[in-house]
Image: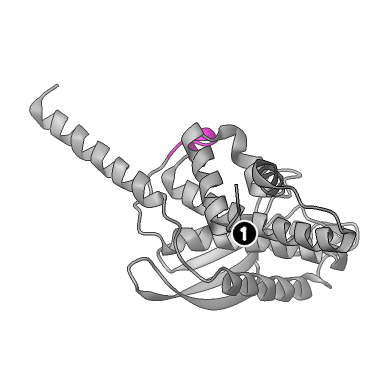
């Protein structure tokens, strides 16, 4: 290998090492505020769609693709200390047959975060009894995309699956999601413990219960490297002030 190629390789490795170290620090932002935005835009979107989905039909068949169902501007500060206005929208997305997954996208060109509802959702998926689940899903997605929006780590493309789930840029966003979802599980455990007058799980057992209560954790855990698995557990303990 020539000296020039060796230099390029060293620079590349230093760059990746810097990204990895940076990704180990959660980006600070007001998760409660982001959650409130998710709540409000979801409520607005559900009101918009309430009388637009035909009985027995799907969202995609009743509302045009990419239709804006709700939007709101949120002001947040990135890791450089810059205040930025982000436009948060809920739109009707596109998906392959019977794919009911809700997805999020951040566009740095215009600071827009879009939550795409699957066009295969039907009236039963969006009714009043599902509102809490929909709000929590949208909140988790918005937290993930806000983390990307406030980040300054240069994103590099990876493959899908394990490579994607272990990308330093994604690990930071996934970890923030998992901590938020686990915090809700912890709150529920404490309420149940007091109401039923029974002890809560403790130590390592509590960590496993909290992790398994996180939808994001269940989706990515099989792909995680040992280092990222340990990292998420360490952050969970720190952020939720757990005793292990």
Q: Position of residue 171 (x, y in %)?
A: 49, 47
Decide: few, some or many residues near mark 1? Use Cα within 10 Å; few <14, some 14-19, many ≥20.
many
Instruction: Give above or below for 29 relative to 122.
Output: below
Residue 93 visible in the displayed image: no
Q: Is residue 174 left or right of residue 108?
A: right
Q: Circle 1 — which element?
A: helix
Most extreme residue toward the left, as rendered?
3
Instruction: Give above or below for 70 relative to 177.
Output: below
Residue at the spot of label 1: 180
Q: Quadrant of residue 17?
A: top left
What's the magenta region? 158-164
Query: Is 163 a magenta residue?
Result: yes
Residue 134 visible in the displayed image: yes
Q: Position of residue 202 (x, y in %)?
A: 70, 47
| 44 and 24: which is toward the camera | 24
Q: Is residue 68 left or right of residue 199?
A: left
Rendered residue at 58%/58% (across/down): 241
Q: Is residue 7 left or right of residue 129?
A: left
The N terminus, quarter of image: top left
Rendered residue at 82%/58% (across/down): 193
Q: Position of residue 65 (x, y in %)?
A: 66, 60
Q: Quadrant of residue 80?
A: bottom left
Instruction: Give above or below for 94 relative to 17.
Output: below
């Amino acid at each position: 290998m020539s000296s020039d190629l060796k230099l390029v390789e060293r620079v590349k490795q230093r760059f990746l090492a810097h990204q990895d170290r940076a990704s180990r620090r959660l980006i600070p932002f007001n998760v409660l505020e982001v959650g409130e935005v998710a709540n409000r835009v979801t409520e607005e979107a559900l009101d918009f769609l309430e009388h637009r989905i035909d009985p027995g039909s799907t969202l995609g068949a009743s509302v045009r693709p990419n239709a804006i169902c709700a939007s709101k501007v949120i002001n947040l500060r990135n890791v450089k200390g810059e205040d930025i206005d982000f436009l948060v929208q809920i739109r009707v997305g596109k998906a392959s047959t019977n794919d009911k997954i809700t997805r999020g996208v951040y566009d740095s060109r215009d600071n827009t975060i879009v939550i795409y509802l699957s066009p295969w959702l039907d009236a039963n998926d969006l009714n009043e009894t599902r509102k809490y689940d929909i709000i929590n899903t949208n909140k988790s997605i918005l937290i993930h995309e806000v983390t990307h929006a406030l980040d300054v780590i240069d994103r590099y493309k990876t493959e899908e699956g394990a490579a994607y789930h272990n990308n330093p840029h994604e690990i930071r966003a996934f970890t923030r999601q998992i901590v938020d979802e686990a915090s809700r599980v912890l709150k529920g455990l404490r309420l149940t413990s007091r109401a039923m007058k029974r002890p809560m799980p403790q130590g390592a057992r509590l960590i496993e219960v909290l992790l398994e209560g996180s939808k994001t954790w269940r989706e990515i855990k099989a792909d995680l490297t040992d280092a990222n698995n340990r990292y998420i557990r360490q952050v969970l303990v720190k952020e939720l002030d757990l005793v292990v």
